[in-house]
Amino acid sequence: MNSREELAENLFRVAVELTRIGSSDVAAETYQLALRLDPRDFQSLTNLAVIIDKSGRLLDAENLYVKAASHPFFDPFAMFNLGYLYGRTKKLDLAELWYRRCLVADPNYHPAMVNLSGLVQEARGDLLESKDLLERALSIDPKDTIALYELANIYRQHGQLYEAEMLYFKAVDNDPGDPTAMYNYASFIHQIGEHDRASALFDEAHRLDKQGVLKRGGN
């Protein structure tokens, strides 16, 4: 490692710490300094893209993610974030492409499996691949809350209620503060006829829902 690369690496560490303490603007400037010293620093490219993405400059973030995800960098984190960006903007074909590329670059990148699972359901109604992806993700991280309740939803659709209930319970037990996990569990409990218990769980889910993303209602 030459002196420019060593300094770029030190700046990268400083930028990470600046982000951790909430100084994202200064962190972005520090990543830019690191990239002037070492334009091949794909970690700085990706982390700078994340800051820009969160600021709403999606086109600039997209360009940086693509640069970090392309030869000679092949950063799976950048590929994952590209998939997530395209998913948020409803470019589902591109989202699927980048999630799959992420899994080629890193076959154990389980968040990509979870997001791709939801995408193939939304785009094509493909429950079979979705189930396979979620099971693979849970084999890597058995405590992935989203994977747990999404797999439970698939079991529920297939009428495998015992398996579904066990997974819903695991999701809530794993992260009692997750409003979506709680809401899905409440919906299941309502379906099997435990309405009073379901009502209490729905109330708890909405109490936890600080962002207001859950629908109102009973089931």
Image: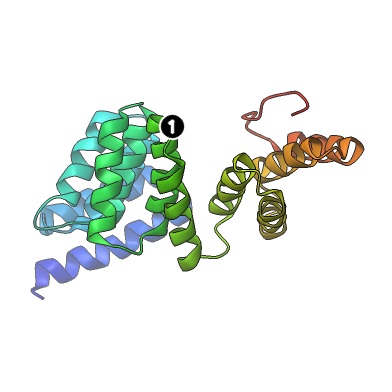
Residue 70 seen in the current view: yes
**Depth check, front residue: 115 or 130:** 130
**Depth check, front residue: 187 or 98:** 187
View extreme (right): residue: 196
What residue sits right under mark 1 in the picture? 122
**Label 1 SS:** helix
Q: Residue sitting at 19 percent across and 50 percent down?
A: 69
Q: Quadrant of the C terminus?
A: top right
Q: Residue sitting at 46 percent across and 67 percent down?
A: 140
Q: Report whether 134 appears left or right of 91.
A: right
Seen in the picture, residue 67 relative to 210 is either above or below; the reply is: below
Q: Quadrant of the N terminus?
A: bottom left
Q: Residue sitting at 22 percent across and 67 percent down?
A: 9
Q: Report whether 214 appears left or right of 191.
A: left
Q: In terms of image quadrants, where is residue 58?
A: top left
Residue 49 seen in the current view: no
Q: In terms of image quadrants, where is residue 34?
A: bottom left
Seen in the picture, residue 79 relative to 10 is either above or below; the reply is: above
Residue 50 position, x and y percent, is 34, 44
Q: How is the image coloured?
A: rainbow
Residue 105 position, x and y percent, is 23, 59
Residue 203 position, x and y percent, is 82, 35
View extreme (bottom): residue: 1
Estimate how packed mark 1 is, as few (under 14), some (14 to 19) or many (20 or more) residues with alpha carbons within 10 Å. few
View extreme (front): residue: 159
